[in-house]
Amino acid sequence: MKTILDFAAFKKKNQKITMLTCYDYTFAKLLNQSDVDTLLVGDSVSQVIHGYPTTLHATVAMMELHTAAVAKGAPNKFIISDMPFLSTRKGIKHAVEVAGTLMKAGAQAVKIEGAKGHEKLIQHLVESGIPVMGHLGLTPQSIHQLGGPKIQGRDDASAENILNDALALEKAGCFSLVLECIPTELSRKVTYALQIPTIGIGASAHTSGQVLVLQDMLGLNADFKPKFLKKYSNAADTTIAAINSYVAEVRTQKFPQAQHSYE
Ligand code: KIV
C-alpha cells in the first residue's frame, strides 16, 4: 500500500500520481487488482450512487458506510475519504470526530475542501495523526456560492487567491492537494510553488497527478461529457447490451440451460 511518503517521493521524482474515486466493494476489489495508486471515497458518492443533484447531500453516515465498503474491497490501496459538507464548519471537536469516524471506517487520510477557516483544523488533524488532502479551485461543496460548476481562477485576483490558499494548505500540513477545474497556467504555477503534490481534475497536465470519477472514465455516465473527461471505455453501452441479451434469452428460453440448472 502507498503512504503519504510515497506521495512526497512521487513529486520529487516527477512521477505522476494516479487516483480514482471508488464507493463500493465490487469496484474496490477490481481497483485493488489494478495499478492505480490511490482511491478517493469522494462525496460525489451523493450524486453518482445516491442520485442527488450535488455533493451537499453526502452525510457522515454515508461516507462512513462507503469508506468501509471500499476498505474491505481494496486492502492494498491508500484510501482517502471526503469530509462531507459542513462537517468541518461545526468546530474542531466535531470535525475531529468526523475524521476519526472515517479513519476508523478504513480511510488512511481525509480530504477537506477550501482553505479559509480550515488552517487550524488541518494543523490539528495532522498533529493528531490524520493525513489531510486539500481541495481548491472548483470546490463542489461551495457550488451555490460559486454560482455553478464554473472554471475557477480565470482572473488575476482569483488566481492569486487560489495560489495563496494552496500555500496556506501546505503550511497547515496537507500532504497533497486536489486542483479542480482551473486554467493550465494557474495549475502549473501552483504545482511549481508547492513542495506537496497536486492532483488535478480539469486542471491540465501540469499537476503531479490526476483523478477522475471511476464511473465517468469508464463511460457509465453517458450524458456526462465535460471537456476534461476522457472516457476509457463505453461501459454504458456494454452494460445495456448485456442486460438486453439476458432479457432476450430469458424470453426466448435460451437461458437458463442444463449447465445452469441443478439435477
Ligand atoms: O468527490 C469527488 O469525486 C472529488 C473529486 C472530483 C476530486 O472530490
Image (cartoon, grey):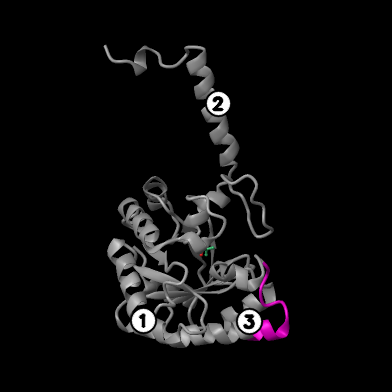
Residue 231 percent across, percent down from the top left? 61, 49
Query: Which residue in the structure is indicated by mark 2?
Result: 244
The Cα–Cα distance between marks 1 and 2, rounded to whole angstroms, is 51 Å
Residue shown at 29% from the left, 81% from the top: 128
Residue 155 percent across, percent down from the top left? 73, 81
Residue 150 percent across, percent down from the top left? 68, 68
Q: Which residues are magenta?
A: 150-160
In this rendering, would 229 be left or right of 47?
Answer: right
Amino acid type, label 2: Asn
Amino acid type, label 3: Lys
The Cα–Cα distance between marks 1 and 3, rounded to whole angstroms, is 31 Å
Residue shown at 38% from the left, 81% from the top: 91
Residue 189: assigned label: 3
Marks 1/2 in contact by CB < 8 Å: the verdict is: no
Quarter where residue 233 is shown = top right
Query: Which residue in the structure is indicated by mark 1?
Result: 92
Residue shown at 34% from the left, 52% from the top: 69
Residue 216 percent across, percent down from the top left? 57, 51
Front disc: 3 or 2: 2
Mark with earlier residue (1, 3): 1
Going by the picture, which residue comes out furthest to the right? 155
Dot 2, how many residues are within 10 Å of its Cα: few (below 14), some (14-19), or many (20+)? few
Q: Is residue 208 magenta?
A: no
Residue shown at 33% from the left, 15% from the top: 261
> Which quadrant does the C terminus fall into?
top left
